[in-house]
Image (tube, rainbow, N blue to C red):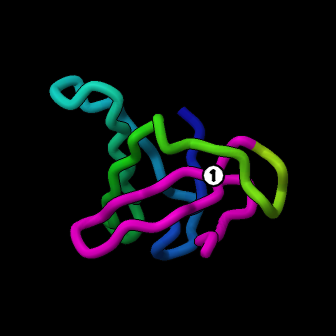
Amino acid sequence: MATQVCPHCKKKAFTWYIDDENSGITVWGCYQCHYKAEENEKDECICDRCGHQTKTKLRDQDKEYWWCFTCKEIIK
């Protein structure tokens, strides 16, 4: 499984697994800073900045935000 850049610590240590109990929910976790977030793949869309379909909405215990895995940053 490929790792992605963590939106919290910016290290390439963000990995995922599918939550079998919540169909369609991807759980992301960083093995460097232990940050966790959930992604509903229905929210995935094309990023206005890079044009790739790698923009998705992540939710953690405090907030919900758009993140682009290609741009590697929060999209406002």
Residue nearer the viewer, 8 or 32: 8
Measuring from the top left, give residue 25's x and y in whole percent. Answer: 32, 36
Within the image, what quadrant is residue 16 found in?
A: top left
Residue at 34% from the left image edge and 66% from the top image edge:
35
Q: Residue extending furthest right?
A: 50
Q: Which residues are magenta?
A: 53-76
Residue corresponding to mark 1: 55
Measuring from the top left, give residue 56's x and y in whole percent. Answer: 54, 51
Q: Is residue 4 magenta?
A: no
Q: Residues within 10 Å of mark 1 (few under 14, many from 20)?
A: many
Q: Is residue 59 magenta?
A: yes
Q: Amino acid at mark 1?
A: Lys
Q: How many marks?
A: 1
The answer to whether 42 appears left or right of 21 in the picture is: right
Q: Is residue 27 above or below residue 72?
A: above
The answer to whether 1 appears left or right of 68 in the picture is: left
Residue at 37% from the left image edge and 38% from the top image edge:
26
Q: Is residue 14 above or below residue 20?
A: below
- Quadrant of the frame with the C terminus: bottom right
Residue at 25% from the left image edge and 75% from the top image edge:
62
- Secondary structure beneath dot 1 equals strand
